[in-house]
Amino acid sequence: MQQRKKVLAICGSTRSNSTNLNFILAISALYELTLDITVFLHISELPHFNPDLDTGDAPAQIAGFRKQIKEVDGVLICTPEYAHGVPGSLKNALDWTVSSCEFSHKPVALITASTGGQKAHESLLSTLKMIEANVGEKTQLLISFAKTKVNHHFEITDKTTLQSVEELVQAFINAMDKRSGE
């Protein structure tokens, strides 16, 4: 039997009951036999990025965050759009990985789930490509009017969205398999 792929899920929303977290938990439930998903719940606790602190002896929270990224097969990012942009806490987290290269060639699945989301999605793709994350056409998804497509029981209720998520996750698994040489 094939081992479950280890995935770190990063929610771009700091809201405790966010639509994006509901999507992550829905994916976790749908793929519990295939993916071992750990949700990074401390994004709001990361210190503000400061290049002077971005050294070999980075703050403990940053060292832990970087270690979690290094130890997984892939990263799932699910985020809303705030004021036509990337939520500050998510951008801050990604900024801490620029010089340390944890995302370099790491398979990433990006879901932007918001009312609109296009501007944040484009901005995140640009950032992820700059840090050399392995995110492609099939491992990214924009879900507009997201609140109407997932419920508080962690179920994706819209058939078209569910199919799109399933296609994204399969492409993500394929990217992780390819990277690990399976």
Image (spheres, helix red, strand yellow):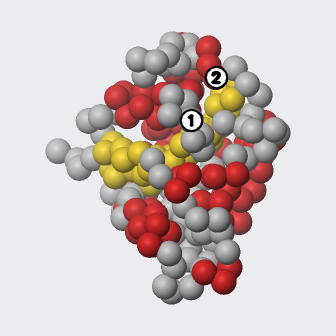
For the residue marked with disc 1, what is the amino acid? Arg
Label 1 neighbourhood size at 10 Å, few (<14), some (14-19), many (20+)? few
Of badges 1 and 2, the one in the foreground is: 1
In front of the other: 57 or 5: 57
For the residue marked with disc 2, what is the amino acid? Ala
Q: State whether residue 29 is above or below residue 13.
A: above
90 vs 22, left or right, is right
| Label drawn at residue 15 | 1
Residue 167 visible? The answer is: no
Residue 143 visible? The answer is: yes
| Label drawn at residue 146 | 2
Report the residue at 63% width, 52% height from top.
Answer: 90
Picture coordinates of residue 50, whole percent (x, y): 67, 75
176 vs 82, left or right, is left
Q: Would you identify the image quadrant in which residue 79 lies?
A: top right
Report the residue at 40% width, 62% height from top.
Answer: 68
Residues at badges 1 and 2 in contact (C-beta under 8 Å)?
no
Instruction: Tell me the quadrant of the picture where the C terminus can be found.
Output: bottom left
Picture coordinates of residue 73, whole percent (x, y): 39, 57
Label 2: state its secondary structure: helix
Decide which of tag 1 and tag 2 comes sooner along the chain: 1
